[in-house]
Image: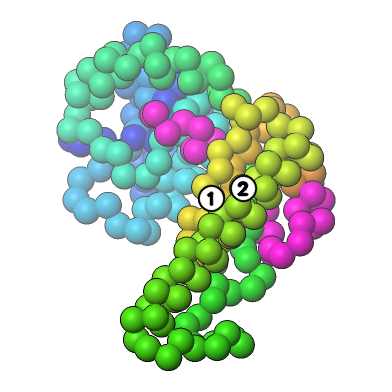
Amino acid sequence: MSLLIHAISASPCDEPPRGLAGVPLVWVPAGELGLWASPSEGPLDRELVFDHHRIVEQLCARTACLPVRFGQRVEDEDVARERLAARAGELGATLRRIGGRQEIAITLLWQCSPVIEGRGHRVQASTPGRRFLETRGQAFADEDGRRAAAEALAERLVRELAVDQADVRHAICPAPDLALSSSLLAVPGAAEQAKEDAVRVTATLEGVRAVVSGPWPPYTFAETA
């Protein structure tokens, strides 16, 4: 029976949540670590994503865990043990650093849309070749300017929120309408305060609209899992 992995922990917890479709979770120990999984056969439908997230949240609320993103499946318990044993040192170190912590997500969207060709007040070039060169040059200039502005926003967030560089992840300009997608790792017991601080700081930023969400299990900081 194949297993869909939900989280990695150092020990099982009392009264674990129900697994996918309400079936009991499976605890697979491997040395000093173990993983929680649900028996899973067939396609991984999108409807299962929310159930997976529910399980991860409830496990993390009960014990220190490394959350595993949806979709990681192994053939059976023996394969799960082999994979855990092969990465025990790396996973154990990550668990000690982020176990019991939560992340806050900050998304900054540009208030003005990217330049659309043919709009604005710039005089159009007289030949197709010159129009191509000017359009390409303007696109590069706009992209470079936006990236520089987004990097400045990222630096300001880190400075004003007084977070350690090791506890923040930034994606700079991940899409045309996005300036920044950031994840902050809150200290244990302080996630709600970290969210309030993020809302307060992002409200002072100009040129962007902020969306602050969470707290979530620290998926972003457990990417090695």
Amino acid type assigned to the residue bearing label 1 in the image = Ile
In the image, residue 160 lies at what x, y percent? Answer: 79, 40
Mark nearer the N terminus (2 vs 1)? 2
**SS for dot 2:** helix
**SS for dot 1:** strand
Task: Give the residue pinned by disc 2.
Answer: 151
Query: Is 162 rendered above or below residue 79?
Result: below
Amino acid type assigned to the residue bearing label 2 in the image = Glu
In the image, residue 8 lies at what x, y percent? Answer: 42, 25
Residue at 40% over, 16% down: 90
Distance from label 2 to label 1 (Cα)? 7 Å
- Nearest the viewer among 188 and 148 is 148
Q: Are marks 2 and 1 in contact (CB under 8 Å)?
A: yes
In the image, residue 5 lies at what x, y percent? Answer: 34, 35
* Residue at the extreme bottom: 126
Q: Which residues are magenta?
A: 199-225
Q: Is residue 85 magenta?
A: no
Task: Give the residue pinned by disc 1.
Answer: 172
Residue at 59% over, 27% down: 166
In the image, residue 223 lies at what x, y percent? Answer: 42, 33
Residue at 50% over, 80% down: 116
Query: Is 131 rendered above or below residue 4?
Result: below
Residue at 42% over, 45% down: 52
Q: Quadrant of the C terminus?
A: top left
Query: Is 211 rendered above or below residue 114?
Result: above
